[in-house]
Image (cartoon, rainbow, N blue to C red):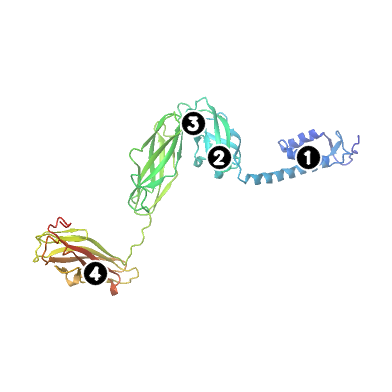
Amino acid sequence: MATNPPATDARVISATTDRLFETVEGLFGRPLTAPERLTFTTRLAGINTTAVAPGDLITADLFNALRADINDLALRMAIVEDGVRNTASPPIITRIEPPGMRTGEEMTVFGRNLSPATLTSITVGGVDVPLGRIISGADTVLIFPSPAIPGLPAAGAQVPVRITNGAGEAVQPFFIRGATTDVLVAGFAFGSPGLRLPGGAALPGQVAANTDYDLVYTVKASSSRAETFTVSTVITPASGGWSASIVPGDETMTVPQTVAMVDRTVRVRVRTGASGTASVRLRVRGTTDANAGDESTETPVTVATAPPVAVTAIVFGPLVKAAGGAPFAVAGSTVYFGNASGAATDRVVRCEVTVNAPAAATGATLYQIGDLVVSGGAGWEARLDMAPGERSLSAPAGGAAQGMIRVALRFTGAFDAASPTAFDRTLSVPVTGPGGVPARNLTFNLRRRTDHTSPTPP
């Protein structure tokens, strides 16, 4: 057997290949992986086999070169593993701590692909752990409170811990003890609430100011023992007209211990303010132990910004009966005269009109109330019951003006009950701005009937 010549200026050691493995693993503080052992062996195989045999002396320089090769391999493996870690891969669970823990305590899961941002669900013993309750997490470690597991004895049992992401799932059994009889452990998952009208109808459109709406929550709850939980709500800010309260009948939720989890619907009645946004939270607390409970995340409710009022608009109020001794009536946009209505007496109807100055106006804007027109034929007399000074309205810049249009009416035709619609007419009163723009007509109908209280033809 050939041997190495003795070294005169280098420190030498004597070791077998297995001993070298043990020495290197001691330096690294861990076992060598199969690829690392292969690299190590390949490096050894590169030595002149005619000059090296088992039991021969190996110089420190050679040993240091081998160690450098292994360090280089470890770095390369780390880069490769990091690349694998950043691809979509199912979770891997290597261990769970602490042993002997009880429900409600923090659970720590070690493994790979555990980043909270990539997870889709966590369950312990079949009970959901809301992702929002994760305390901390990274690719290799995840910490969260273990939920209440109904029916789990205080002495404990093996339950599955299941972690899922978009690429798959990992399941590992873990021994966990149930809560002691004097400790209430409860878990809750709050679904994203939907905003509806009271009674459950869908929103007809945008959220209006000073209006009641219902935020409808779906709450999943579990408890280590039978418990009735109180439900309340918090709104921020609670000013400016905003308020929130639990709809009567939804103030409590009972969770029997005999079921794994219950679903409840909880409605929060929200009264919107005049404007802006308020945030609503749902809060659940145990009745025998107020420390057992949870809160939902905040849900914003925003009043839609009203579109600007058309400042050039001419707005008419409702038509109303103002005066008249003989029978007549007003219904919507129609004036009815009864059989006792003679030609000698005026009946007056009135309507409030509002005019707004144009947005670009720098001074007052003058609106005129014009002469009325009766269309459809004869049989009626009509006039504006207004002094000349009352027939114009001046809207200040950026503001509005209001006035009252009054119309005096007489029926002058020869009424025949056999032809009750013979004197149906339409009356219009124009209101116009400078140069005839903008313009809008106050229009209503004139009807003569046998009885003014029965406006439909006999």
Q: Secondary structure at mark 4?
A: strand
Other residues around mark 3 within 10 Å, as few (<14) / some (14–19) / many (≥20): many
Q: Which mark is residue 40?
A: 1
Q: Earlier in the sequence, mark 2 or mark 4?
A: 2
> Which residue is identified by label 2?
164
Q: Earlier in the sequence, mark 2 or mark 3?
A: 3
Q: Is residue 189 visible?
A: yes
Q: In the visual, does 224 lie left or right of 37?
A: left
> Which residue is identified by label 4?
430
Quarter containing the C terminus: bottom left
- How far apart in space, not on screen, are marks 1 and 4 (Cα)? 102 Å
Q: Earlier in the sequence, mark 4 or mark 3?
A: 3
Residue farthest to the top? 155
Other residues around mark 2 within 10 Å, as few (<14) / some (14–19) / many (≥20): many
Residue farthest to the front? 418
Quarter containing the N terminus: top right
Q: Earlier in the sequence, mark 1 or mark 3?
A: 1
> Which residue is identified by label 3?
149
